[in-house]
């Protein structure tokens, strides 16, 4: 059951430390990865335009975020191309037709250990940061901002460059 699975418990924030012999990087915060700002696509972008943008900018993937800030998912170049070529989507369809809507989020203050647990099952995690927004009438709310996209390669690169052995 996932409720007694330590990796599931870590990924979902119910446990912090379960490894007895943690690697040196386990408790370092995600913000130390120095991720570059992600390319973000709005949901109304067409599949064809998404392919063009991703290729032009040199990205394999991009979060799809509504103007309200709601994170809708992730679009990848390969999935978009294969969906169009297989006839499951048209070039003119909005990118939301080929968006992965199941993804993991991680915060800047979370540990690389938690990230490692997420990346054991997922190809990427969307790094989010909560920010307070205030309106002119004095009301305020917390909004999640996409700070970056992190992959296992990002974690591996950080560990190999900073190896403490």
Image (cartoon, grey):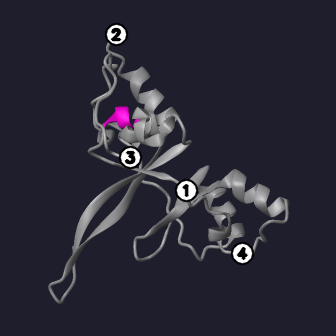
Camera-nearest label, 3 or 2: 3
Q: Is residue 149 above or below residue 80?
A: above
Residue 105 within the magenta-colored segment of the rendering: no
Magenta part of the chain: 111-115
Q: Is residue 9 left or right of residue 80?
A: left
**Which residue lies at the image location 71% right of the left edge and 54% below the top edge?**
79
Percent coordinates x, y for residue 96 in the rendering? 62, 69
Residue visible at 40% across and 71% down in the picture? 69
User: Between tags 1 and 4, which lies in front?
Assistant: 1
* Looking at the image, residue 48 lies above or below residue 23: below
Identify the residue position indicated by label 3 in the image.
12
Task: Name the foreground residue: 149 vs 120.
Answer: 120
Mark 3 or 4: in front is: 3
Dominant SS in magenta: helix
Q: Which comes sooner in the sequence, label 3 or label 4?
A: 3
Which residue carries the number 1 mark?
102
Q: Secondary structure at mark 2?
A: loop
* Residue 81 position by quadrant: bottom right
Question: Which comes before the other along the chain, label 3 or label 2?
Answer: 3
Mark 4 to mark 2: distance in Å?
A: 51 Å
Instruction: Give the residue pinned by disc 4.
Output: 93
Question: CA separation, marks 3 and 2?
Answer: 30 Å
Q: Secondary structure at mark 1?
A: loop
Which of label 3 and label 1 is nearer to you?
3
Residue behind mark 2: 165
Q: CA distance from mark 3 to mark 4?
A: 33 Å
Q: Earlier in the sequence, mark 4 or mark 2?
A: 4
Residue at x-position 27% and y-position 30%: 27
Asked if labels 2 and 3 touch by Cβ distance under 8 angstroms, the answer is no
């Amino acid at each position: 059951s996932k409720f007694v699975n330590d990796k599931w418990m870590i990924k979902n924030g119910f446990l912090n430390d379960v490894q007895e012999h943690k690697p040196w990087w386990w408790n370092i915060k995600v913000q130390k990865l120095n991720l570059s700002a992600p390319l973000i696509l709005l949901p109304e972008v067409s599949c064809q335009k998404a392919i063009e943008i991703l290729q032009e900018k040199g990205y394999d993937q991009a979060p799809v975020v509504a103007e309200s800030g709601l994170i809708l998912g992730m679009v990848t170049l390969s999935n978009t191309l294969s969906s169009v070529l297989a006839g499951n989507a048209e070039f003119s369809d909005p990118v939301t037709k080929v968006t992965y809507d199941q993804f993991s989020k991680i915060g800047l203050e979370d540990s690389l250990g938690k990230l490692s647990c997420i990346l054991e099952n997922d190809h990427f995690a969307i790094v989010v940061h909560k920010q307070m927004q205030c309106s002119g009438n004095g009301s305020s709310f917390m909004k999640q901002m996409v700070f970056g996209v992190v992959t296992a390669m990002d974690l591996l690169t950080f560990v190999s460059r900073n190896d403490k052995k």
